Amino acid sequence: MTERATVDMWFDPACPWAWITSRWLLEVEQVRPLDIRFNVMSLAVLNQGRDLSPEYTGFLEKAWGPVRVCIAAEEAAGPQVLRDLYTALGTRIHLRKYEFGEQLYTEALTEVGLDPALADAAGSNAWDDALRGSHDAGMKPVGLDVGTPVIHAPGPGGGDDKIAFFGPVVTPAPKGEAAGRLWDGVMLVAGTPGFYEIKRTRDVGPVFD
């Protein structure tokens, strides 16, 4: 890949693994000819109707808030606002350990120059159709037995040819050329016809640095 290409990432702000992957992608953007475009998916939507533990069900109930705020912000200011809004939300959620709630949303919205009143979207289902549309667009090429993050990258055929996959799940986020090498490897395996999975048990939690 020599010309700059657009790579789409679908994220749920509540997911720590997606956050680390997003920080890796921003590193890749500096060392490979890529522009990262952010899109919203929802763990709450993905897991509706599934048999889940009470603890995870409680987490998902709270996770509706940030994705609704992101969709409301996207509709108000355009999709380009998601890059900075995700950073503002994720920094507070994963690094500063904010609880999901009005302070989180109003601070993040204000930081990126948006109307803090958009925080009201967290408790409203008015944006849920748009949220589901964004979520479905991300999940359609990869199926429903994966989570967040999901990445769509240009395929070798150009045009509508896409390489879509879940992950990578990595911690901590590689930096500099190490980030670029991981991208090269991910694209090599994900772009191989018939390749579906490579996995090992996680023995550490997310490392934010």
Image (cartoon, helix red, strand yellow):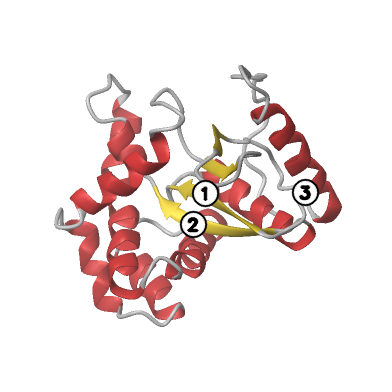
- Residue 158, visible in the rendered structure: yes
**What amino acid type should be assigned to the residue bearing mark 2?**
Phe
Label 1 sits on a secondary structure element that is: strand
N-terminal label among 2 and 1: 1
Residue 177: x and y in percent read: 85, 52
Q: Quadrant of the C terminus?
A: bottom right
The numbered mark at residue 179 is: 3
Q: Residue at x 52, y 49 (%)?
A: 9
The numbered mark at residue 9 is: 1
Label 3 sits on a secondary structure element that is: helix
- Measured Cα–Cα span from mark 1 to mark 3: 16 Å
Camera-side residue of 96 and 189:
189
Camera-side residue of 177 and 33:
33
**What amino acid type should be assigned to the residue bearing mark 1?**
Met
Label 2 near label 3: C-beta < 8 Å? no
Q: Is residue 44 left or right of residue 5?
A: left
